[in-house]
Image: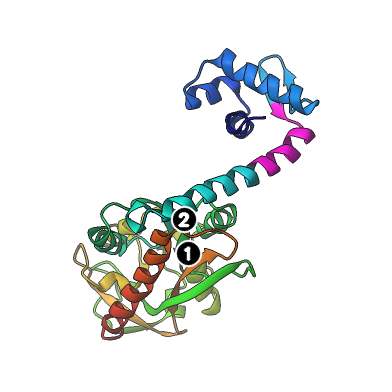
Amino acid sequence: MEILQLKYFQKVAKLEHITKAAEELKIAQPSLSNTIARLENDLGVPLFDRQGRQIKLNRFGKIFLERVNKSLLELEEGQRAVQDLAGLSKGSITFSSSISKILPELIGEFLAKYPDVQFRQVIEPISSMKKSLESGEIDLCMASLPFEDSEIDWKTLLTEEIFLIVPKNHKFAGRKTVQLCELHSETFINLNAGFGYRKITDKFCRDAGFIQNVSFEVGEPYAIVRLVEQGVGVAFIPALDWLNPTEEITHRIQIVEPTCQLTIGLAWSKNRYLSLAALEFKKFIIDYFQKISSDIKSI
């Protein structure tokens, strides 16, 4: 049994399609089919149920895939540990975040200090982050909801106030404060369901006695401000967005009841190997938020 066989099997099991797997692996389809057949012959059981050109992972394949995933992950982490011996500059980082506002500056400053580090960053919902941490697909993630899991470490970075923004011609424009219950009939612009920020603001509204009426869902936080300015609706906006804004944000209103705050934190798996680069980035993030926390408090 060879490592290449296992990697080929992993890809076919993920796609459950020989042709697509061969295309992604950039090998000939007959060669891939023969490799899977040899693997099944070595194991003595079929790993897929076949009906014509359709294949589906069977119960043997599912059990075997769990072990293959763990084994290949251990090998990858072993490779990274060895590469770390060459020094920080040879390390790699996979980072996920549901908070996009400060990422360009944060990542830019880090890469300016360590330009040779290989960096991959994705934005995804919290539910996906937790799975990615557990599987080892990402090293670190920054989120607005803590992970309640004994296998994941959580470091609180910042607690910021959440404000309300409204269109220029809105009846509340010009007001300094508002009680959230006053907005029970308003239409909101917010992130898609599944993002931690959305779950938190939904709770704010429930605590104020109503269900948030989201008329427009977006996957990119930057789009919210633009839609408010177009008069599509009102929106929640965290204090962090008022640090070096990329576009003019007007008519910010403080929510005085209930207290609306957002806690940002950093998470990582206790069971996964973190490269020297990832450890350095973790420290860099913590130090970065310590520097900007005073600026947030002054807003």
Q: Position of residue 215 (x, y in %)?
A: 43, 57
Quadrant where the image shows the C terminus: bottom left
Q: Amino acid at mark 2?
A: Asn
Q: Which quadrant of the figure has residue 59? A: top right
**Residue at image coords 43%, 79%:** 261
- Per the image, the residue denoted by label 2 is 192
Q: Is residue 276 above or below residue 162?
A: above
Q: Position of residue 152 (x, y in %)?
A: 58, 67
Q: Is residue 174 above or below residue 67?
A: below
**Residue at image coords 47%, 51%:** 82
Q: Would you say 250 lies left or right of 126 here?
A: left
Quadrant where the image shows the N terminus: top right
Instruction: Report whether residue 142 is seen.
Output: yes
The residue segment tinted magenta is: 56-68
- Per the image, the residue denoted by label 1 is 198
Q: Amino acid at mark 1?
A: Arg
